[in-house]
Amino acid sequence: MTIKSVILSGGSGTRLWPASRESYPKQLLPLTGERSLLQETALRLKDFPGGEVDPRPLVVTNEEYRFIIAEQLRQIGVRSPQIVLEPVGRNTAPALTLAALVAEEEGDPILLVMPADHVITEQPAFQHAIAVGAKAAATGALVTFGIVPDRAETGYGYLRSGAALAEGEGARALLEFVEKPDRATAEAYVASGAYYWNSGIFMMKASVWLAAIRRFAPEMAAACAAAVAACTHDADFIRLDTAAFERSPSDSIDYAVMERLAEAPELGRGVVVPLSAGWSDVGAWDALWAVSAKDGEGNAARGEVLFESCRNTLVHAGSRLVAAVGCEDMVVVETPDAVMVAHKDRTQDVKKVVARLKAEGRTLTQSHRKVYRPWGWYDSIDAGERFQVKRIVVNPGAKLSLQMHHHRAEHWIVVKGTAEVTNGERSFLLAENESTYIPLGHTHRLSNPGKVPLEIIEVQSGSYLGEDDIVRFEDTYGRGTS
């Protein structure tokens, strides 16, 4: 049978602030290599030796991330992905139900359900476990993957396993989901050999999941079915009916179905497949340190970093050189607009910083200084009273909306590539080192007709410089008119 990847890409990853923000969360960041966690997840079955794999992943996400996800998938060569856009968040069970409904339109594949923000460092071991899980899923089982624990961890839920199954390779009966334990209980779990960490990764046929959700959560099943039945298709995007999906209850895969399988054995047996493949959910900065490459003193670095007399320290430099001197068991994260320093044992408390910033109305939790748009990105490099300076990069063939501003004028200077400019009634080309002035109230548009990225410096001046001072008359990307 065909295996289809279902990637769940919601969540904001507040414990990885300031690198992770609401508009650009951790799954979109390259935390362990050159590719983002989303990209690594989409490539997790590349060259899979255990069966046929649908090359088009199915991603369930929200409206805000849609263009970033589509672009990141394009960058790694994924063609024609199916990107389901949830109008509101309803947790993982409705997300999987949507994916199963969409997948079932083309057959009854085995769904491999993966969060977009996990790290797997040993891909061959991962693929071996998936091959074992696929054998069980093909027989109608609902499979989950249990992480073989290497320590007594109180921050994870656990799976209790039973007898070995005919699938072999360690596959066992799934007996119970267990909530996060205290230290003594966790130590007993690990010592018993019958317990695994709950990875949040699942496998089952699309039809098997749909039968289970109709049995255990009929209201959810009906709302998701109605939302998909009335959906619209826009390029790679599948837009659900908002009113129908809003009627769905919110619940997780675990609670909605997996923990209740014993109530209806006719729906399929629960199976747990042990997974030992360098897994981490990267729940906080100390978890990232644990799965990162380290020097001889246990230090891990990303970006331009200089260690002097440091041990067991993580430094994440986003925009400049960071020099760490005499640090031990520390985490230092630098971005263009914020720096976070924490002891490695206190990284879970970063969420408290995020909560305080939100309470104070600070935008630092929402977006980076560099903001991605469907046409490219911009970086607000300087600002003061009545002025703002942006570096703008427009992808080849892309264009901004036809728009105007009530409160600001703009100067554009081309520093790389060729710009096609609409300025009032005129349209013209600008080459490198050429510029134009957009008066307040003029209709204007910036396009890149070339084959290389267009880069300009924009100087805004006026009484109000907020991003909401935009009236859109025409937009390639389906955004609103105001």
Image: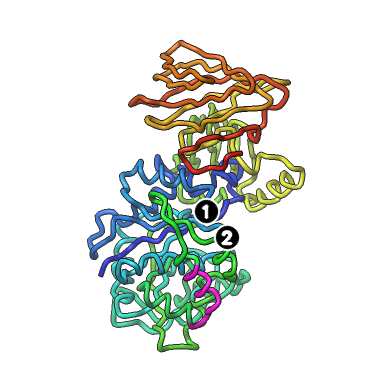
Residue identifier under label 2: 89
Magenta highlight: main SS = helix
Q: Residue furthest front?
A: 425
Q: Secondary structure at mark 1?
A: strand
Percent position of residue 119, x then y: 44, 53
Quarter location, residue 370: top right
Q: 379 and 236: which one is in front? A: 236
Q: Residue at x 52, y 81 (%)?
A: 216
Q: Where does residue 80 sit, x and y in percent of width and height?
A: 33, 50
Quadrant containing the N terminus is bottom left
The quadrant of the image that shows the C terminus is top right
Which quadrant would residue 140 be assigned to in this image?
bottom left
Above or below, comparing residue 379 to residue 94 in the picture: above
Instruction: Work out whether residue 232 or residue 93 is closer to the camera in this orientation and state it.
Output: 232
User: Looking at the image, is 321 positioned above or below residue 159?
Assistant: above
Q: Is residue 341 visible?
A: yes
Lower sequence index among marks 2 and 1: 1
**Eyeballing the image, is 103 above or below 59?**
below
Image: magenta residue range: 215-226
Label 1, on which residue? 62
Question: Can you give x and y, in whole percent of width and height, for residue 265 in the image?
Answer: 43, 88
**What x and y, as percent, mark residue 469?**
65, 32
Query: Given the current orientation, which residue lies at the most extreme top position?
Result: 433
**Amino acid, disc 1:** Asn
Q: Are the residues at dot 2 and dot 1 in contact (C-beta closer than 8 Å)?
A: yes
Give the amino acid at mark 2: Gly
Residue at position x 40%, y 82% in the image = 173
Position of residue 389 in the picture relative to residue 393 (left or right): right
User: Label 1 crowding class (10 Å Cα cut-off): few <14, some 14-19, many 20+?
Assistant: some
Inspect this view and state whether residue 280 appears: no
- Observer-nearest residue: 208 or 275? 208
